Structures are given as C-alpha cells and as structure tokens.
Image (tube, rainbow, N blue to C red):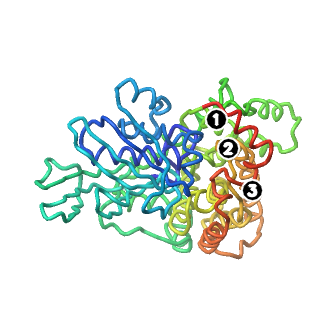
Amino acid sequence: MNDVLGPIMVGPSSSHTAGTARVGLMARALLGEEPAGARVTFDPGGSLAPTYRGQGSDRGYVGGMLGLDPGDPALARSLEIAAARGFRVEFGVEPLEENSHPNMSRIELTGVTGRRLDLLGASTGGGMMRIYRVQDHPVDLPGDEHELLVIDESGSLRRECLDGPPASLPAGRWVGYAPPVVPVAARFGQQPLWTTAAAAVACCGGSFGEASLAYELNRSGWTEARAQEHMSRIWDVMRAAVQRGLTEDLSLIGGIFTTSAKGIAAANAAGRLLGGPISLSVAYATAVMEVSNSAGVVVAAPTAGSAGVVPGVLVAAAERLGASHEQILRALWAAGGIGLLIARHATFAAEVAGCQAEVGAASAMAAAGLVELAGGTAAQAEGAASVALQNSLGMVCDPVAGLVQVPCFGKNAMGVGNAYAAADMVLGGYPALIPFDEVAAAMLRVGHALPRELRCTALGGLATTPTGEKLKQRLVL
C-alpha cells in the first residue's frame, strides 16, 4: 500500500514535499548521471506557485534530484546540500503548455557531462506522482514499475517493461531507465484482487484487514511475512512520531505557530478535558502533526496534511484495548484498504478536491481500523468508513500562510472525533446506507465543484482573512 499508509516521509506535505521528491528522483534516474543544474517551473494557475516554499516543494524537488528518498532526514537540508555540491537549481513561475493537474511542474535538468532532460510531471496526492512527458514525447509513468524509454534514430519513443533494473542499456538516440520510486513495485500485468468495497467485504473470511492484506500479496508478489514486516515498520514510525511529539521541544516551520500536543496530553491525564480517550487521540494526532511540521519523519496516512488521524486514533485505541501486534496490523491493513478504494474512486490531493480528500479520507480509514481493532466485521468496517467520509464532504483546504498548520492541526483533531463517532455508530447498529464506493465518488464530484481558492492554494478561506494575511507577512522560511 505504497501511498495509502505511506510514504514514510519528511514533512510537512505529501503532495508538496514527498511527491515532488519522487518526481525529482525520477528525473535523476532518467537523466542517468549526477545533475549539475536544473530549472523547475510552476504554472501560475496551479497550487505549487503560491505554496512551494511554505510546504517544502523546493526541498522535495532538489532532494529527489540529489537522490534522497522522501523519508531521508537529509531532505530537510537538501537546498544547503545542493549548494555545497555546486548543484544550481532555479525555480520559476510561468504558464506551462500543459497544466491538467494543479501540481504540474516542468523540470529541465542538465547532467555533469552536459546530458539534458526535459520532463513534465506532477505530484498527484499522498506522495504519488506521474510523469506526463519526457523530452518531447507524451508518457504516463506512475513510478511503480521498471521501464526503459528509448528514442530511436527516427525520433520515435519505445517503452519496454522489465522485471527489474536492466543489466545494460540498449542502443538509441536517447535512452532512459525509469525505476520504481515507491517501496513496492507492482507485478507487471497483475490484475488487482478487488476494486470495490463490496468485493473486499466478500473476500477472505469477513475481515477487512485480511482482505486488504490479500490484495497486497496479490499485487506485489511478496510473502505474507515480508508484507507484515513492512506494515510493522509503518507502525513503528507512527508510534515514534507520537512519542517524539509528546516528549521533544519542536520548532515548527514558518515561526508563526506554537506546539500544544504536550499540553493536551497533560490536561487529559489530569482529567481536565471532556473527551477522555478521544482527547488522548487528539493529543497523539497533534503530536504527529507537530513532528511533520518541524520537518520530522512521519507516515503519510494517506497524506502528510492528515498524518495525525490514523496514528492518533489507532495508537491510543490499541493502548486502551490492550491490542496484540497482530490485531494492530490487521487494523492498519483495514485502514489501508479503505484508502485504496479512495485512491481508485477519488483522490488524496487537496489541490484537486479540498481537505475532504485528506482529513476526510484519513478519518474514514481510521474508522475502519477502529472497527477492525474492536473485532467488527468487514461490512461494519466499510460502513464506518462510509459514515466518516459522508460526514466530511465539502471540507475546504485553506492553509494559512501556505503552511500545513492552520487549519490542518484542528482538522486532524476533528477527523479523530469523527472516526470514533462513525465506528461507534456502526458497531451499535447504525446503517451507513450509502455504499462507500459511492461516497468516495461523490467526494470527488464535490471536490471538483469547490472553487480553486478553496483547494490548497492559500488564496481563499482562512488564508485570506486579515489575520491570515498578517501571518503570511510574518512567515520565516
């Protein structure tokens, strides 16, 4: 589940930091040598032009072109590393000939031998990315397979799918190797085990977690032991982010917002808060968001802007219920399976559909995980996810000063409460009524109906209040 529970990444934004790092990684791979210089161009009508500094896109692109993985802590220092190496990168804003995605960018990359690459790509949400053009040729590269791109003497492009990295490169006027930039490469030509919630519910003995694990084994060809080990690492990173946020003194990007996770946790422990277990989950979710927004390592779940919800809910609930490691992993798989359906039917990109695609999606995933943790059925997990997403339709994304802090921290807390409410309602007999797949499709339609100003551009909503404008002027990057 590459970009549902993942990537493991340096914050603050999966779309603007992790996804751009993967675009940079793909550009580096296709260039085939160490880069010496680059120009990255954003369309003025897209979401990156006004936010690429505040949400770390510049660090992401440069880090990827340097060969840094989205989860490498050095990504936070990529601009300084590039300068020390003499790697010159220029960022610009001008109309792109194609801007079908709000996170579209053009990369013009020059290698140390003078080899050149001209690439058009986009971060498509949750750390996912796509390459749409290489040199002058249209392509569609999601970065989850091994491929060779060969431009022959006539100027035609040929693509070859491989089982792994090539032993040698074939002859051609221009040859580039496009490797997977995600942790789990897809088996070429393998059809997914299921593509709807109904099929997932019918699969594998009635557990949504088991159905999701079966999906991943079928897709990747991994053994169950290897898949469970990978998910265990996801869990470890989630717990570590909670612990770090509750114990360390963190400095948030931008200098306009202060930390509060420790205070919420202390007030909960002293019995001064009304929410009980939910308040503890809010403290945990806030801790994760503070780690992400101090350029720390978190799990995008499914995005960095919503990274607090799933760990906030499941870490606290697992502690309260005394859940075994096996139960926890099943809950994570259940959450991931709901995310898979959102990725298939809708999007994780707030730039496309607003915050319902981030915190709304995360809340639905957490609700399914809670049901799994409580021993509920696959149908109940699907129902809880449906209710949680229904409750989230229409959420706007209006980041103040272009940062992933206000209102994102508060919306993560809201997503926590929504997940508990949806899980409890369904476990108590409440009918979701609308199937999850239909709710996800409706979410995408609602997102398309939102004005551009309310889709992660920092051009509307809270971002353009008088206080929001003042905070933007105080921003320190």
Q: Amino acid at mark 1?
A: Val
Mark number for residue 312? 2
Asked whether, in this view, residue 442 is left or right of residue 15, the answer is right
Q: Nearer the viewer, residue 35 or 302?
A: 35
* Measured Cα–Cα span from mark 1 to mark 3: 20 Å
* Measured Cα–Cα span from mark 3 to mark 2: 12 Å
Asked whether, in this view, residue 146 is left or right of residue 401, the answer is left
Q: Amino acid at mark 2?
A: Gly
Q: Amino acid at mark 3?
A: Asn
> Can residue 364 be seen in the rendering of this structure?
no
Quick one: which residue is furthest to the front in this view? 94
The residue wearing badge 1 is: 242
Q: In which quadrant of the rendered view does residue 193 lie?
A: bottom left
Residue 149 spot, x, y in % from top left = 23, 57
> Crowdedness of circle 1 by 10 Å Cα count: few (<14), some, many (20+)?
many
Confirm or deny contact between disc 2 and disc 1 (CB under 8 A): yes
> Which label's residue is closer to the chain start, 1 or 3?
1
> Can residue 428 be seen in the rendering of this structure?
yes
The residue wearing badge 3 is: 418
232 w.r.t. 195: above or below: above
Residue 361 spot, x, y in % from top left = 63, 58
